[in-house]
């Protein structure tokens, strides 16, 4: 409904809520009707008038001091953003009539965002109360000193009572004389009718609310929800707010009766009135009737002997504008006798005789007053007092909150403190609950909550304080940096109070003179306490005399630091304050009265199934409320399940757990594992306390708990693997902040928390148990919608930790084995370590197989193979002389098991391309195991159990399999190792066939076969050793064995030509040793250079020889040279003898060779064996050069 423009003034009224029935046609009273006589239905409740008829005499006609708060609670969506003013229509009219009226004005003003709440502040009745209770004495003294030296309660005259009585009778006559008015609910509105000069309120109105020390509390009436935009299931909506901790009575302020304190919205209509550019939420009780030319009219009674003045005209005009009533019906009487009726259009009221006024001036007055108030009532949570003394032209604005704080009395004696705090809380809660609410409003919400907490005493109002602090903690995103709406990071602000009153004061000083002509008086004897003053009410009629320069609080996201730890710490500080509020509201055992210990502590809570708590305080885990049978059993700290403390603690514990989890995760990423363990420990203790309080767990909580356990497992694993920094980690772990200690103290009220061990075995064990617990949670029925990826991740972590634990026990078993005495049998403890390790590997393999992770399956199979090799090594047989015995069956068993596991690993990988690194590793281990099995059988042959031929077959088979897995062609870091392994295998096989050839008697075919195999493997071994630069000794030894093999063949030959041919071949092999001696010579020169650079005196040549250069074994070199020289001498001597005895003169080439052989032989005979090793090697190289220098030397050797 809209009136549009009325005399160039824009006005629009929309009824937001109404309890009034549709307007009924008023009864046109006959002329000469005597209004002094009461009608039959007088003072009976009626649907048309509601309680108006009974209240019009003044029993409760006054505007209640908290009427604006009742409306604000019902239309919380509009507070702070859309509406400029919330007030009773009578207060609005009184403000707009200030320049025209000499009456006093006394109003309380409160600010929430851009909204101002205006309430009647009957200062005189307040002082009447203070004279009885002793409260507000400071304000009484201030009032008497600065405002009114002598104040006196004004009483209504008999004339005023007479006028009210006939008005009441007139209205009852006007409803068709219905004497059987049906009673209506007490929630309907009431109407007050102002007279010309706005007479003083009567003394029969409701008394002021009791001081906040009394057992009062605040709650919103949920019986009739007047606001459609706020759902009942609001998470943060305030339900019962307990006040006094002594009794914790949860009586609601909105309940009808004496405890209501006027906070109920009991207006017949709530109207959103837009007057020019001012948006007001107005409460009115004006009766509206039907009839006339319009569907709605207002009915007024006037004394025909008293003309209408300006104040009455403005009153009627504003009432009709606010209620969107287009017509006024005026009934004139003389001494109570009806004379006539007159109908006046609303737009014609300003032009009535004797009451002419300018609507534009009224508009200017409204704009100036609003600007004045908005410019000076800047602090949310403060109570401002707008005061104009009767007959005065000066309007003053005081900050009662500041004045109260300056006195010795408690600030909680301000009766507006609790309603204001609740309103701030409700506005913040409503903004938090809007789905899709942009984070840019979080700064506003935070400011509202901080101001709310600042107003309240924690002991009196623990529930609001706890809930507000929890909401403050919810404002901070712990998993991502704070971002603006455009995606850009917002600048860092004050981490504690980014929007503070102090900042406002810096932007606009209280004594600023830029807001118009009002100013703060500098006279200390008069107005030094006033925030601002309007020096003359006439200024309010000047267009745009006052302009609001105070910036309305903008919407913005919380400008907190980008540092994640700082954000978490801020969250934890709010959580701690919330926990303190909850804990402080619970009776301690020492404070309980002596009573039957079997009787539960009577905390006097209402039944949550029927109270407003269940409807209004919907906490994070409401769906996890315990069963009814558990409600009788309080928790360890005395909390009764279902109470507000119970629900709030669950939320706070969960929030703290999440904050500590984020801190732990961040510390883990920074590799601060000690700090990470401390944080995750507290996070898990928070969950433990949560479980101690709650009787059932929501799947979301279980899912988060699984994340905590997983992170704890990761941290414990990292600590177990990084033992070098254990001292630093331990120091980080033991450090605690004050907040941490106090949170832990609160946790200990609910559960006993155990410390976490710090040694590697326990850390790995805890890590494994954490992952197992996570796995149990994920596969349980509570996770009905878990994704397969989550289960795969858990199984992967579980397989990994079981591998780590298995490796830990395997390494410990290997250590025990090395420390065990040589002749001591395997101990039980060692076998237990094997079993633990094998069990972990086996479980880990199953975990990885369950998720199809072939790579990790292969790695665990490989580790299991290594464990089998350790078991094999532990079972080696030792003789009584402490020497290694024969290769035992147990060793063979475990080596074969190891081979089986390696082959399974190979089959798991299928092909090398799947994971080359793992494939190569398994390939190497398999080759090594075959090689070790073969060498152990060859070196410690079990001749007592097996025949020589069987052993040789098994050795050959194992060696060839090992050779099969030697990857000689793939270029990698392991290629030289493969080459060395293959060369060693060929050397060993050649040595074995060499031995068989020497020892074989009778079977010439077999001997010939052995000889061919020995030559084949010797040649392959030499070729492979020649590819290596760091195996000169192995190459030289192989070549010397090859020469010895030739020499042995020569002994079995009878003809000189055959012998000469064999010896020539052996000499050729000798000349090929030059490559090995060159490598040795290079190493010796390098060692000599290092020794020359050394400052120490190394005069002993033996020390030089016994040293090592780049891994070269000098003792081995010396032994080989001592074998090489006699062998070369033997070859040369026999060659010379054979060439002499045959007396074959084949030409100059043979003669030259003969001379060289004799010459080299002669030098070898005269060589000094005591000379340094380097000199001897140089001599050998020189001799080999001489043997190889003769052209055709190789050909003659071949002949």
Image (spheres, grey):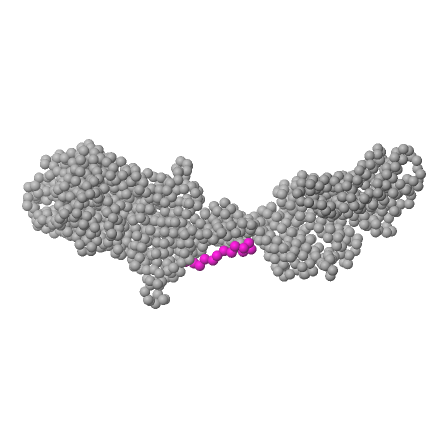
Outermost residue toward the bottom?
596
Nearer-the-camera pick, 128 or 697: 128
Outermost residue toward the top?
8
Residue name at image x 18 percent, y 51 percent: 127
Nearer-the-camera pick, 1100 or 983: 1100
The quarter of the picture where the C terminus appears is: top right
The quarter of the picture where the N terminus appears is: top left
Residue name at image x 75 percent, y 52 percent: 938
Q: Is residue 1194 visible?
A: yes
Residue name at image x 56 percent, y 50 percent: 724
Height in image: 518 above or below 891? above
Residue 543 location (% of width, % of height): 20, 33
Height in image: 15 above or below 7? below
Q: Which residues are magenta?
A: 750-762
- Picture quadrant of residue 301: top left
Give the left or right position of residue 978, taking residue 659 as reference: right
Count numbered badges in the picture.
Answer: 0
Give the left or right position of residue 385, taking residue 334 as reference: right
Q: Main secondary structure of the magenta part?
A: loop
Residue 789 location (% of width, % of height): 52, 46
Residue name at image x 40 percent, y 60 percent: 636
Q: Is residue 428 magenta?
A: no
Q: Is residue 755 magenta?
A: yes
Residue 390 location (% of width, % of height): 14, 43
Q: Is residue 1028 visible?
A: no
Residue 1185 location (% of width, % of height): 80, 36
Nearer-the-camera pick, 1025 or 485: 1025
Height in image: 366 above or below 963? above
């Amino acid at each position: 409904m809209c009136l549009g423009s009325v005399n160039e003034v824009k006005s629009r009224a929309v009824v937001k809520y109404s309890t009034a029935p549709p307007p009924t046609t008023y009864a046109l009273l006959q002329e000469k009707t005597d209004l002094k006589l009461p009608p039959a239905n007088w003072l009976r409740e009626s649907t048309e008038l509601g309680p108006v008829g009974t209240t019009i005499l003044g029993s409760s006609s006054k505007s209640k001091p908290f009427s604006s708060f009742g409306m604000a609670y019902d239309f919380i969506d509009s507070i702070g953003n859309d509406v400029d003013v919330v007030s009773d229509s009578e207060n609005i009219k009184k403000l707009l009539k200030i320049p025209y009226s000499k009456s006093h004005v006394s109003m309380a003003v409160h600010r929430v965002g851009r909204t101002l709440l205006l309430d009647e502040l009957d200062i005189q009745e307040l002082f009447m109360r203070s004279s009885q209770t002793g409260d507000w004495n400071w304000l009484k003294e201030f009032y008497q000193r600065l405002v009114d030296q002598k104040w006196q309660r004004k009483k209504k005259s008999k004339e005023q009572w007479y006028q009210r009585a006939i008005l009441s009778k007139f209205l009852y006559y006007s409803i068709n004389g219905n004497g059987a008015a049906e009673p209506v609910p007490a929630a309907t509105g009431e109407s007050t009718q102002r007279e010309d000069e706005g007479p003083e309120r009567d003394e029969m109105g409701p008394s002021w609310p009791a001081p906040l020390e009394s057992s009062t509390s605040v709650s919103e009436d949920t019986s009739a929800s007047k606001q459609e935009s706020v759902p009942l299931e609001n998470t943060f909506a305030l339900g019962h707010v307990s006040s006094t901790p002594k009794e914790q009575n949860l009586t609601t302020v909105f309940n009808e009766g004496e405890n209501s304190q006027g906070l109920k919205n009991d207006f017949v209509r709530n109207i959103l009135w837009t007057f020019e550019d001012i948006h007001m939420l107005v409460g009115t009780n004006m009766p509206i009737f039907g009839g006339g030319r319009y569907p709605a009219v207002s009915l007024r009674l006037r004394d025909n002997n008293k003309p209408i003045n300006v104040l009455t005209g403005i009153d009627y005009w504003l009432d009709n504008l606010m209620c969107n009533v287009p017509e006024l019906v005026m009934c004139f009487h003389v001494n109570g006798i009806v004379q006539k009726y007159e109908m006046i259009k609303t737009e014609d009221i300003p032009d009535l005789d004797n009451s002419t006024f300018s609507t534009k001036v009224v508009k200017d007055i409204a704009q100036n007053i609003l600007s004045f108030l908005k410019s000076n009532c800047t602090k949310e949570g403060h109570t401002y007092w707008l005061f104009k003394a009767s007959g005065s032209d000066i309007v003053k604005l005081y900050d009662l909150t500041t004045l109260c704080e300056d006195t010795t009395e408690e600030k909680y004696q301000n009766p507006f403190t609790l309603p204001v705090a609740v309103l701030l809380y409700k506005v913040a809660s409503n903004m938090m609950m809007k789905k899709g609410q942009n984070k840019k409003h979080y700064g506003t919400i935070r400011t509202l909550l901080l101001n709310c907490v600042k107003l309240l005493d924690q002991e009196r109002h623990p529930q609001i304080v706890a809930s507000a602090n929890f909401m403050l903690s919810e404002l901070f995103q712990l998993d991502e940096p704070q971002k603006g709406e455009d995606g850009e990071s917002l600048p860092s602000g004050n981490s504690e109070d980014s929007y503070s009153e102090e900042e406002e004061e810096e932007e606009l000083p209280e004594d600023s003179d830029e807001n118009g002509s009002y100013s703060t008086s500098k006279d200390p004897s008069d107005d030094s306490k006033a925030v601002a003053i309007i020096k003359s009410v006439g200024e309010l009629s000047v267009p745009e005399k006052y302009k609001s320069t105070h910036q309305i609080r903008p919407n913005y996201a919380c400008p907190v630091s980008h540092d994640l730890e700082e954000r978490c710490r801020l969250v934890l500080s709010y959580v701690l304050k919330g926990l303190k509020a909850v804990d402080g509201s619970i009776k301690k055992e020492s404070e309980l009265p002596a009573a039957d210990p079997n009787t539960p502590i009577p905390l006097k809570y209402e039944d949550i199934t029927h109270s407003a708590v269940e409807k209004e305080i919907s906490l994070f885990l409401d769906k996890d409320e315990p069963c009814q049978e558990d409600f009788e059993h309080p928790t360890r700290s005395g909390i009764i399940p279902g109470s507000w403390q119970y629900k709030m603690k669950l939320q706070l514990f969960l929030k703290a757990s999440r904050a500590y989890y984020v801190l732990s995760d961040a510390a883990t990423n920074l590799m601060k594992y000690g700090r990470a363990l401390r944080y995750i420990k507290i996070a898990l203790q928070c969950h433990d306390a949560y479980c101690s309080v709650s009787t059932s767990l929501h799947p979301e909580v279980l899912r988060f708990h699984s994340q905590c356990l997983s992170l704890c497992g990761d941290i414990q694993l990292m600590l177990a693997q990084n033992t070098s920094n254990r001292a630093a980690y331990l120091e980080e772990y033991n450090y605690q902040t004050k907040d941490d200690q106090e949170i832990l103290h609160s946790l200990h009220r609910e559960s006993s928390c155990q410390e976490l061990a710090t040694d590697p075995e326990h850390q790995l064990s805890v890590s494994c148990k954490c992952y197992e617990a996570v796995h149990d949670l994920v596969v349980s029925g509570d996770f009905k919608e878990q994704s397969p990826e989550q289960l795969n991740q858990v199984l992967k972590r579980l397989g990994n930790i079981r591998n780590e634990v298995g490796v830990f026990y395997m390494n410990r078993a290997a250590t025990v084995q090395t420390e065990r005495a040589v002749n001591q049998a395997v101990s039980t403890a060692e076998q237990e370590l094997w079993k633990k390790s094998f069990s972990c590997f086996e479980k880990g393999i199953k975990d990885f197989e369950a998720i199809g992770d072939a790579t990790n399956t292969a790695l665990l199979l490989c580790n299991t193979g290594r464990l089998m090799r350790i078991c094999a090594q532990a079972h080696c047989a030792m003789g009584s002389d402490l020497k290694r015995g024969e290769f035992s069956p147990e060793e063979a068993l475990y080596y074969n098991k190891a081979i089986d596991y390696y082959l399974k690993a190979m089959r798991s990988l299928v092909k090398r391309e799947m994971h080359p690194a793992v494939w190569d590793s398994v390939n190497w281990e398999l080759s090594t195991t075959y090689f070790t099995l073969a060498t152990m059988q060859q070196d410690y042959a079990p001749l007592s159990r097996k025949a020589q031929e069987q052993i040789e077959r098994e050795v050959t088979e194992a060696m060839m399999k090992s050779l099969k897995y030697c990857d000689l062609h793939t270029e990698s870091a392991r290629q030289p190792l493969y080459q060395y392994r293959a060369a060693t295998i060929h050397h060993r096989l050649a040595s074995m066939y060499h031995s068989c050839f020497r020892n074989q008697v009778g079977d010439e075919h077999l001997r010939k076969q052995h000889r061919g195999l020995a030559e084949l493997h010797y040649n392959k071994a030499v070729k492979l050793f020649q590819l290596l630069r760091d195996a000169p000794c192995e190459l030289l030894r192989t070549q010397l064995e090859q020469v010895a093999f030739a020499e042995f063949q020569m002994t079995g030959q009878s003809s000189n030509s055959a012998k000469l041919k064999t010896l020539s071949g052996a000499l050729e092999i000798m000349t090929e040793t030059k490559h090995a001696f060159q490598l040795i010579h290079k190493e010796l020169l390098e060692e000599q250079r290092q020794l020359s650079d050394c400052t120490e005196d190394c005069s002993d040549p033996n020390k030089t020889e016994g040293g090592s250069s780049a891994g070269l074994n000098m003792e081995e070199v010396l032994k080989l040279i001592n074998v090489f020289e006699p062998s070369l001498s033997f070859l040369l001597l026999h060659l010379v003898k054979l060439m002499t005895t045959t007396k074959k003169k084949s030409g100059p080439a043979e003669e030259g060779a003969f001379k060289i052989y004799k010459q080299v032989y002669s030098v070898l005979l005269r060589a000094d064996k005591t000379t340094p090793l380097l000199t001897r090697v140089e001599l050998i190289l020189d001799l080999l050069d001489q043997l190889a220098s003769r052209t055709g030397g190789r050909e003659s050797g071949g002949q």
